[in-house]
Image: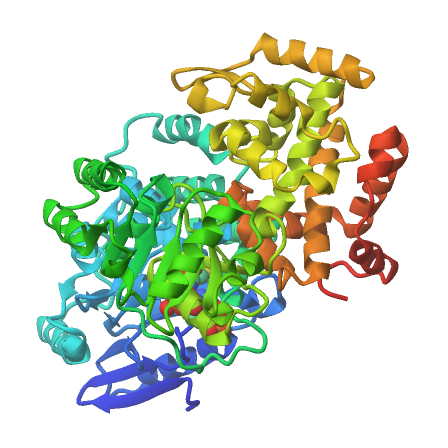
Amino acid sequence: MTALVHYRLDGQLALIGLSRPPVNALGQPLRAALLEACERAAADPAVAAIVLHGANGLFSAGADISEFGSEASSAAPDLPGLLVRLTRIDKPLVAAIGKLALGGGLELALACGYRIGEPQARLGLPEINLGLLPGAGGTQRLPRLIGAESALNMILSGKQVDVQHAHLMGILDRLADNPETLIEQACVYARELLAQGAPAQPAARYPSPAVDLPEGFFAGFRAEQEARWKSRLAPRLVLAAIEAACLLPLEEGLAREQDLFRQAEASRQSAALRHVFFAEREAGRIPGIDPALDMRPIAKVAVIGAGTMGGGIAMNFANAGIPVVVLEQKSDALERGLSNVQRNYEISVKRGKLSQAELEKRMRLLQGSLEYADIADADLVIEAVFEKLEIKQQVFRTLDEVCKPGAILATNTSSLDVDAIAAVTSRPQDVIGLHFFSPANVMRLLEVVRARRTAPDVLATTLKLARRIGKLPVVSGVCFGFIGNRMLEPYAREAMRMVLEGASPAQVDGVLTGIDLNMGVLSMLDLAGIDVNYLVRQANKAAFADDPSYCRLGDELYAMGCYGQKSSFGFYHYEGRQRLDDPTVEKVAERLAGELQIPRRSLAPQEIHDRCLFMLINEGIQLLDEGIALRASDIDLVWINGYGFPAHLGGPMHYAEQLGLDQVLDGILRLQASLGSHGQRWFKPAPLLKRLVAAGRTRIEKF
Ligand code: 3H9
């Protein structure tokens, strides 16, 4: 027997333990070992029942994601076939679920006739997050166990449920008292089943899963959800599979599920989402930094500034149980900031997402202060004051004086030079940038800006802490705007320029939302604040001083006091939550075009797409070449998690690879030639893009 599976007998029971750390991913070698073990137990007359468990306490996180898209994914024994075989063993199988049963792991448990879970275990079918559907019987067996509607909701949400929920829903038959007694209690359960003469597979609770569904349920559901799904394939395939579970006998339903699964697995969307899965894990690995490096202890945090950003940042730490001092200059600003935080928590309580007791606990962790002396013992200080270099430098001079040696001093800047901030202290090795995205308590992305002299342990500690507070940290080097906002510049520049040339904001944004971006760039600027964008641009004026048309529309709207949503006027006009076209914007654009001698014309959607997207991609490639981004996939994570780029397109770098790097280069050169002096000035292919294409490479990597 291979070491991937532990096999032992306990009286009439065979105990089969999956042993493929870290998560018992059901890759081909484990599948083969599991099948062999099950056949052995099935054939052994001394074995009356089988208990299946995770030898390391964790049941299974599902199919091996790294196999998808290769032959290994369906190499014999394939998972669906293996599970059908398990359902045909004429002896009861009990799945003893510890820690996790996800995806194919839960499907494995569903193929067992009986299931018991320990209190901390979580169950789910998260395939949808990978652009897939459960493909090893989950879409057919779950509806027969818990009904079609519950199964549909669980599979479409991809969310994990705890054991209490799983028990109530009928997924688990029993709950073990604790993780340590799980296997023992699973064995007791198996013996009880034998004593009762229980069948290997109990009768389905919902043999006709659609029995409670109203007439026309699926058509209605589809019509209701279509807009939300945008062009995502997987939800549609899930719905088709559940429909099949309702219409077809099990065997035919399983065959239909396999067809649908293969379609999903072969899709670009699933490839993109799998890329994102591995990108998120890769982002934590920093070349040259030993993962075993000693971390600095972080027991107390301080945030300078109780504005929207400072308050949101502080909430992250309170949420994670870490005491945090919020420092302000004036008591009214401090009170306002803390009551905003309290209000945010109250909204969560109203929505049922937080208990009152938890609110109070979190508020107790937040201490307001007007004295720098109160942060002298903080292990990490995050400055979140006004975005102006001189102001931030002044704060850092003070921090240098008051903070204890070894404290990590972080600046929450979205574009300023972190080296210049570090330089005013006597300890630049302790200084780092932490660019939180707004709202800081909600947005998952955290750009971690490694300055020239940031010490390795400061970077490593910050990355670990970021994960502890539930953020997705992505490392960036120092440059104007770091990864995200630097790429936003050329992207927004083209959008604004095209409005001068004759496109309406709605046309530009429509092309972008047409490829499933959450928002078009102009709507995004309205949301973020045209004033904020203007001020950031002013700080980098030298970079575009020779282009009189550069973001002129944004400058003009700023001068008119049209700051976007907050002032009800921006690239659009806002009435409540409604976004409307604003004829004034067109008039301003016409006037500016006249002044700048830019001919007005109509722009085709393809041109809008290429100008925005290719400039975004080109800047990303340049960032990689400069070493600001460590890898292309980090750039993808920034744009997916900070700027609403659809994960099912894999982020702008992955999207470029899907389009073809040669196509992107051709497109940039074509626009360079066709857009006159504007094209000559801005449509310059990144040297790395040219090198990659010349070498026939199809992946974006340093080269
Ligand atoms: C499926 O089951 C399809 C079937 O329906 C049909 C098939 C026919 N495969 O996240 P972590 C690795 S689709 C391969 O850092 P955590 C991960 O890459 C699957 N590898 O730890 C990492 O490796 P490394 C449905 C996997 O504690 C290491 O394990 N299942 C898999 O924060 C640790 O992971 C899912 O979608 C996998 N399935 O979170 C579950 N899972 O150290 C996906 C993990 O080299 N997984 N790895 O970077 C997760 O959600 C999280 O990884 C998990 C652990 C919650 C399990």
Above/below status of 524 relative to 183: above
Is residue 598 visible in the rendered image? The answer is no
Is residue 460 visible in the rendered image? The answer is yes
Horizontal and vertical percent position of residue 444:
42, 50
**Who's the residue at 23% across and 36% down the image?**
332
Above/below status of 554 relative to 68: above
In this rendering, the count of numbered labels is 0
**Who's the residue at 56% across and 49% down the image?**
416
Q: Name the foreground residue: 216 vs 568.
A: 568
Residue 696 left/right relative to 217: right
Residue 595: quadrant of the picture: top right
Classify the position of ligand 1 by quadrant: top left, top right, bottom left or bottom right. Answer: bottom left
Residue 683 left/right relative to 115: right
Q: Name the foreground residue: 461 vs 234.
A: 461
Task: Assign the N terminus to one quadrant of the image.
Answer: bottom left
Task: Assign the C terminus to one quadrant of the image.
Answer: bottom right
In this picture the colour scheme is rainbow
**Who's the residue at 72% across and 24% down the image?**
498
Horizontal and vertical percent position of residue 630:
62, 64
Q: Name the foreground residue: 390 vs 164.
A: 390
**Who's the residue at 62% across and 67% down the image?**
71
